[in-house]
Amino acid sequence: MWIQRDVTLEPRRRGIHLVTREVLGVLPELETVQTGLLHVFLAHTSASLTLTENASPAVRTDLDAWLDAAAPEARIYEHDDEGPDDMPAHVKASLMGPSLTLPVRRGRPALGTWQGLCLCEHRDHGGPRRLTLTLHGE
């Protein structure tokens, strides 16, 4: 079976946001897959995806602070067409990446106990974010 579906996430403030339920909620077919893969692709260059701690919000806050230190807005960038958060957002998105591939086992992603899918919004006003979900399995 192959299924591909787009989902648009509502705009979020800058930060790292747990979106596991929201993303999986648009794929009811997932429950029928015993063994497979779910690929999640984010079609944007100023946001990213990561798989991280889903229990303590402090992990997401600390990760976001680390990214801010790694790509500070105070630095002078040649590319600043859309404001001071423009190029730092591209740097963060390049470091974190636009996609994840998750194993599927017995109708659900085979994630660790404390793992969750997160949207990393690197812009102050990033807008809606479009994901393409591709599910393959049997």
Image (cartoon, helix red, strand yellow):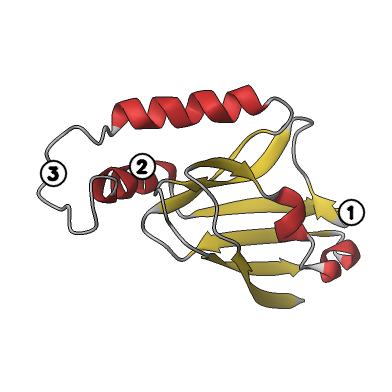
Give the Cα separation between the discs numbered 3 and 1: 47 Å
Q: Residue at x 82, y 64 (%)?
A: 30
Q: Amino acid at mark 2?
A: Lys
The answer to whether 17 is drawn above or below residue 42 in the figure is above
What SS does tag 2 mark?
Answer: helix
* Count of numbered circles in the view: 3
Q: Mark 2 highlights which residue?
A: 92
**Side of 83 relative to 135 (left or right):** left
Residue 4 sits in quarter? bottom right
Give the Cα separation between the discs numbered 2 and 1: 34 Å
The answer to whether 78 is drawn above or below residue 51 in the figure is below
Residue 79, x across and y down, in percent: 15, 53
Give the quadrant of the C terminus. bottom right
What SS does tag 1 mark?
Answer: loop
Give the Cα separation between the discs numbered 2 and 3: 14 Å
Residue 75, x across and y down, in percent: 16, 33
Mark toward the start of the polypeptide (2 vs 1): 2
What SS does tag 3 mark?
Answer: loop
Q: Residue at x 33, y 47 (%)?
A: 89
Residue 106 numbered tag: 1
Q: Amino acid at mark 3?
A: Tyr
**Side of 24 relative to 12 (left or right):** right
Q: Mark 3 highlights which residue?
A: 77
Q: Residue at x 24, y 58 (%)?
A: 82
Residue 6 sits in quarter? bottom right
